[in-house]
Amino acid sequence: MKPTFNTASQAEFVQELRKRVDDHFAHNQISKFANRAMILKSLFFFTTWLGSYLMLVLGGFTFEINFVIWTILGFSISFICVNVGHDAIHGAYSSRKWVNRLLAHTFNINGASAYMWRKMHNMAHHTYTNIDGFDEDIESVPIIRLSPTQKLKKIHQYQFIYIIPFYGLATLSWVFIKDYVKFFKNEVGNYQQTKHPVKEYFLLFFYKILNYTLFLVIPLLVLQDPWYLIVAGFLIMHFFAGITLALIFMLAHVVEQTHFPQPDANGSLENSWAVHQLYTTANFSKKSKIALFFTGGLNLQVEHHLFPNICSIHYRAIAPIVEATAKDYNYPYLCNTTFWSALGSHVQFLKKMGQQSDYKSPEYMIS
């Protein structure tokens, strides 16, 4: 049954929050889309991404140096996706749709279907955040328990130990398995389609083949290293790309402070969609310019979930507005002070998920 939000309640908060944020942009006479700083940041990550790849295939370096380049390339893949492709797929990078469509291809080239990401992330995750069975980001995996509603198994008691390295398989699985499974199964969360556009069949296979060619076939053809070391480098690249992307998203939703609401027997949820986001999403390192720079603003995930159509470069400016409005209306504004405190909270949550079948989300006393 499709969950439904309580749209009749909390309307005043939603209206006031939108008004305050809109007033910020109107008063300062600025666009909600990318500005000069965003464009310069994008150029930096484009340069790092393309530069590391060209150094790998054209540099003629030893394997030891190539090992470092494979690692940098892995980080660069994750950073170009969260800093450019992610905003573009949300339609938040530019007011021009063709610019967003063009930049969304940074996902495709790196092996992740932008078309499927739009369904799994924009539609399922952003609508049904932390609702088991509907949010693709906490989809049930046999060896991982990410929600109190998922069945507790004996192996889960060790997940807080093995899960972080396991995240290193995220992009590898995505590139070789997940997109194909989701595309042909044609079921994402609560969203099902009877037919994909014909061009998406072509784009899926075209970009998959292009990705395999760029990151595996060409290195095998041009690098002087033994084939098994090149394959090892390819796996190293995916390990660092996967673990970076996984942690950015997990630290925003799968921590001790967040809730995992479930609809009642009629499919109804307690809160409106906006308030639901406040209970299921947490920021981290909100004062860190470095975190903001590298995560594409996704350390300020609360702002992103409430305003996914606003470019991430503006999240830092609107964060105080969102926090103040939430407190004015007596709703939570969840945040871990640093990356490390967020990581610690994530690990502790995983430990509880592996040991407590009756885990309860925290209650908030807000003044």
Image (tube, rainbow, N blue to C red):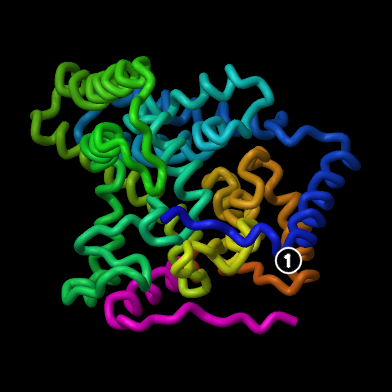
In the depicted structure, whether residue 310 falls above or below residue 281: above
In the depicted structure, whether residue 126 falls above or below residue 362: above
Left-right relation of 87 to 189? right
- Picture quarter containing residue 275? bottom right
Which residue is at the far front? 266
Query: For the image shown, how many numbered marks are present on the structure?
Result: 1
Q: Which residues are magenta?
A: 343-367
Label 1: state its secondary structure. Answer: helix
In the depicted structure, whether residue 267 falls above or below residue 55: below
Answer whether residue 168 is visible to the viewer in this image.
yes
Give residue 77's position: percent from left, percent from top: 39, 35
Left-right relation of 289 to 240? right
In the depicted structure, whether residue 146 falls above or below residue 17: below
Give residue 216's position: percent from left, percent from top: 20, 26
Q: Amino acid at mark 1?
A: Ala
Q: Quadrant of the C terminus?
A: bottom right
Residue drawn at 78 percent across, 57 percent down? 321
In the rendered structure, does residue 254 fall within the stretch colored magenta? no
In the rendered structure, does residue 354 fall within the stretch colored magenta? yes
Give residue 262's position: percent from left, percent from top: 45, 67
Left-right relation of 325 to 57? right
Residue 34 vs residue 180, the one in the foreground: 180
